[in-house]
Image (tube, rainbow, N blue to C red):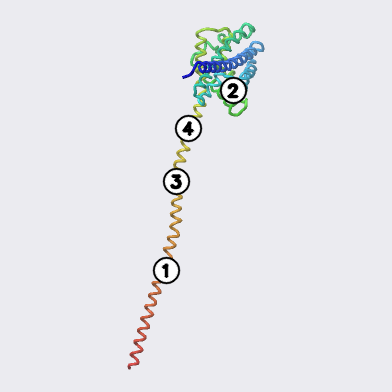
Amino acid sequence: MLNASDKRQKAVGLLKTVARQTASGISAGLMITIGCCVYLGCIAFIGSDHKWVGAILFSVALLTICYKGYSLYTGRIGLMLDNLTKDGFSDLLLGLLGNVIATAVVGIAVQYAIPELRDAAYAMCFAADNAKLTQLWWKTLIRAILCGVLMYVAVSVYREKKTVVGIVFCIPVFILSGFEHSIADMGYFAIGGVYSAKAFGFIMLVILGNSIGALILPLLSKVGKELKKNERDTTEAHAPKTVGDAALQGADSSADTPRKAEARDIEAVRSDTDGTAENNMESMRALDEAGVTCEVENER
């Protein structure tokens, strides 16, 4: 049983963990909202024909998140297969909570501070071609899944290869392709002042799609590794038996060779002995016959 002091320490430790994980999510959400701002700024101040510039500059958000280790939901969900623990899920969900808080607070602040960005964000949600809240649900889901795939590639390449190539290319690709990123969409809605049940449902659908997309490649990789492991185990199970049989056969054959040679030598010796004995017998018979003949002639 824990005493009052231990319970208090445990509660304090839990609160610190929650605060740390949420703060990490807030930091990531802040950077994503800044990325939304630079993209909207290129549309509002330079022109929609130059939105590719904003797509490239958006990479600053994920570069900072990866370098600093902030908790971005779309970057963490694809790594969950290797961290299916209580702490892993806690970090993921509290990070998502921090993402929501940051995009909402910073987005509302930008909405009032930079009206041009508000107008661009509102048009992105309703007035533009293929606007977010006028899409069919299945189109939104597909766009979100494909974005999830790219987000996993960007983060996993950075973690495994220690290079930002995946980030620099994957971020502009998903933006210019029109794919849906759940945290970025939260920022666009907050900046555009779009708060509705439809917007909430849209975000939930995009979160689902991002999650599915981010898990596709790691799941396929895991299946491939399992199949390769089973194939290797099967090969190893058969290999020792075959080698063992060959070794035994080789041993038998090498053992049979001296035995056969020995048998041949013994047979040769027997043949020589038998031949010598027969020759001796013939010689003795010849001598006996010669002796008898001599005695007969003497008697005559």
x then y, percent, for residue 242:
44, 46
Nearer to us in this view, 97 or 77: 97
Q: Earlier in the sequence, mark 4 or mark 3?
A: 4
Q: Earlier in the sequence, mark 1 or mark 4?
A: 4
Query: Label 3 vs label 1: CA separation?
Result: 40 Å
| The disc label shown at residue 242, or none | 3
Count residues near mark 4 (Cα–Cα under 10 Å), then give few for <14, some for 14-19, many for 20+: few
x then y, percent, for residue 87:
51, 21
Label 4: which residue? 226
The answer to whether one can see residue 61 in this image is yes
Label 2: which residue? 170
Query: Label 1 vs label 4: CA separation?
Result: 65 Å
Q: Which residue is painted at 50% across and 28% down in the image?
A: 220
x then y, percent, for residue 90:
51, 19
* Residue 253 horizontal side relative to residue 99, left or right: left
Label 1: which residue? 269
Q: Which residue is painted at 52% across and 13% down in the image?
A: 203
Q: Nearer the viewer, mark 2 or mark 1?
A: 1
Q: Secondary structure at mark 2?
A: helix
* Residue 70 horizontal side relative to residue 1, left or right: right
